[in-house]
């Protein structure tokens, strides 16, 4: 990690990564980011569907006070899963946008 940064800051141009290596790395990053976006969207749809099903079912009376029936309720951890998945999607989208921007800048 620190070696890569020191190579980029070096005044010696032979120590910096070549344009071809950078372009190759960026071209590999695009399908990976798109696959991550696709899988993240699939996971978000599954989690949202499960939570929608839980909220749509009628709860038994006293489910709040009965631990055996409490699994039907939506808990804070469930909402944390949705937020975590949304943040993962955001990270993949940002990665894809930066990769495409760098490709645009390097191909000019």
Image (spheres, helix red, strand yellow):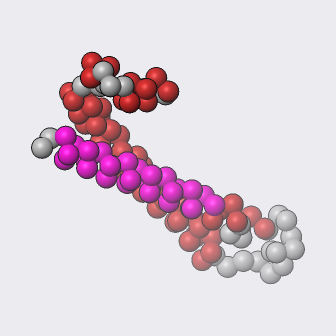
| Residue 81 seen from this side | yes
Quadrant in which residue 59 is drawn: bottom right
Residue 52, compared with residue 85, is above or below; it is below
Q: Magenta stretch: residue 84 in it?
A: yes
Q: Residue at x 45, y 52 (%)?
A: 91
Residue 68: image location, x then y, percent: 83, 64
Residue 16: image location, x then y, percent: 31, 24
Residue 54, compared with residue 86, is above or below; it is below
* 64 to the left or right of 25: right
* 87 to the left or right of 80: left
Residue 72: image location, x then y, percent: 71, 68
Q: Residue at x 43, y 30 (%)?
A: 5
From the image, give the main secondary structure of the stretch colored magenta.
Answer: helix
| Residue 46 seen from this side | no
Quadrant in which residue 80 is drawn: bottom right
Q: Residue furthest top?
A: 14
* 106 to the left or right of 11: left
Q: Residue at x 14, y 41 (%)?
A: 107
- Name the quadrant of the C terminus: top left
Residue 33: image location, x then y, percent: 36, 45
In this orientation, which residue lies closer to the viewer: 10 or 80? 10
Residues shaded magenta: 80-106
């Amino acid at each position: 990690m620190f070696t890569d940064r020191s190579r980029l800051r070096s005044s010696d141009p032979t120590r910096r990564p070549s344009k071809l290596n950078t372009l190759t790395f960026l071209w590999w990053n695009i399908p990976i980011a798109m696959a991550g976006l696709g899988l993240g969207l699939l996971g978000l749809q599954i989690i949202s569907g499960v939570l929608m099903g839980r909220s749509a079912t009628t709860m038994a009376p006293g489910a709040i006070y009965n631990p055996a029936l409490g699994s039907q309720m939506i808990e804070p951890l469930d909402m944390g899963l949705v937020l975590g998945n949304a943040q993962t999607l955001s990270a993949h989208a940002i990665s894809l946008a930066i990769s495409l921007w760098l490709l645009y800048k390097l191909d000019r």
